[in-house]
Image (cartoon, helix red, strand yellow):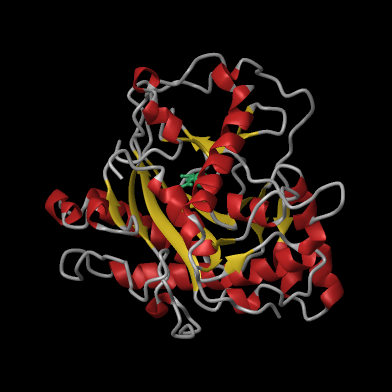
Amino acid sequence: MAAVTSITPSSSSTQSEARQAAQAYLNSRLTNSSGGVRPQPSKPFLIPEINISASFSSDLEDRKVVAKQIHDACTNSGFFTITGHGVAEQTRQGIIKSAEDFFKILPRECKEALHVKNSDYFRGWEPADYTYVNPSDWQDESNAAPETKEGFNWGYEEGLDPTGGDGAYRELDGKKVNGNVWPSEEDLPGFYASIREYYGQILQLARHLFRLFALSLDLPEDHFDAMTTHPGGIARLLYYPPSKDPKPLDHTQKDKEIGLGAHSDYECFTILLCSNASGLEILSPDDVWVPAPAVEGSFIVNVADFMMRWTNGVYKSTVHRVVNRTVDERFSVPFFFSVNYDQIVETLPGCVSDDNPSKYPPIGAGEYVLERLRATAKDG
Ligand SMILES: O=C(O)CCC(=O)C(=O)O
Ligand SMILES: [Fe+2]
C-alpha cells in the first residue's frame, strides 16, 4: 500500500505549470473543433457501456475482466457509461428531486446567503454566468457566451462518509476545516438527508471504481486505498434552463448559449448523473462533438486531468461541454473524485519509460484542484 505523505505546498511555479499544462491541453484539443466544421467523424466513435456487476464478484479474475474494459476505455476516449453499479434508482431520482427543490423552491435570498463568493473553497451557490470552466471563454470578452448553468457545490465531510472517515480530512489548501455550507433544514426540509444518502453511495462506488482503476493499470488492487480514506470529493447540483432558441445540434454554427463551456474535469475521475442525457457533448478523439449516449439507469464516468497527469498521459482526460438546445430544463449531479488532498502525487512508475519520461513534477492533490478552480472565477 502506498505511503501517505503529509502536505507541503509545491512552489508557485509548479502551481502555474499545472494551470498552464491544463489550459494547453484544452486549447490543443479545441483547435481543430472550433466551429465544429467536421460534422462526420472519420471513423465511428463509440462510447463504451460497461456493466460492472462482475466487479463485485469475490473472484479476482472476474474483477480483472471489468478492469480490462476500463483500461480500454481510458486509453481511448476516457469516457464510458456504467450499469450494474448497485445504486438504487430511488436514490438517483431522490437527488434529482433535491436539485429541483434547491433551484426551483429555495427562495433567492436563501441562495444568496450561500453565495460561492463567500467561500475560500468554491462551496455553495453559483448563479448563472458566475464561473467559466474554460477561462478563455471569458478572457475574450468579444467572443464570450455566458454560461447558463446554475450550481450548488459541496465537498467531502465525515458526516457524509458511510465509513465515518479517519478523522484526517484536510481542505484543498491543507487546512483542517470543513468548507461546506448548507441551506437550513427549515428552509429546505430533507435536503441534507438526501445529499447524504446519494453522496454516501457514490463515494463508496468511487472507492470501488478506484480499485478497478488500480487493476486496470496493473497495480495491486489496494494501491489507492490508503489515499482515499478522507478523499477529495466535490459534488455539484447543476441546473440548465430551457434554451431561448431551441434547435437541433448544429455542428456548423457557434452556439450563442452555452450551458457549461468546453472543459476537462480536474480530479481523478467523475461519476455523473443526468436527469436527461441530451445536452452533454463529448469531443471525440478526432475532434467532433458527439452527443453523450442515453443509457437507462447508467452513470457516465470520465477520466479527469489529475489522473491523466498521474498516468503521464496514458489515460485520457475527456473534453466535454453542455449545451441545452431544448425547451426542457436539465439537472445533473457530477461527483469529482480525487485522493486525500494532503497526498503528494508523482507520475506512476509503470507509466514512465525511456521513450515516455515523466512530463510532470510532483504536486499535492488539493493544491492542484484549488489552482484549477481559481482559474474559473471571473472575480476569483
Ligand atoms: O451537466 C453535465 O451533464 C456535465 C457537468 C460537467 O461536465 C461538470 O460539471 O464538470
Ligand atoms: Fe465536466
State whether residue 279 appears in this view: no
Q: Position of residue 348 (x, y in %)?
A: 74, 62
Splitting the image into 4 quarters, where does residue 144 fall? Answer: top left
Rendered view: 281 above or below 342: above
Viewport quadrant of the C terminus: top left
Q: Position of residue 81 (x, y in %)?
A: 65, 51
The residue positioned 62% from the left and 60% from the top of the image is: 362
Rendered view: 59 above or below 301: below
The residue positioned 45% from the left and 21% from the top of the image is: 255
Q: Position of residue 274 (x, y in %)?
A: 48, 49
State whether residue 127 appears in this view: yes
Q: Tell whether 230 sits left or right of 24.
A: left
Q: Position of residue 15 (x, y in %)?
A: 50, 51
Splitting the image into 4 quarters, where does residue 197 fall? Answer: bottom left
Q: Residue furthest left?
A: 109
Question: As rendered, which of 8 and 67 lies closer to the eye?
Answer: 8
Q: Tell whether 330 sits left or right of 222.
A: left
The residue positioned 71% from the left and 80% from the top of the image is: 1
Q: Tell whether 144 sits left or right of 337.
A: left
The residue positioned 47% from the left and 52% from the top of the image is: 12
Question: As rendered, which of 301 and 49 lies closer to the eye?
Answer: 301
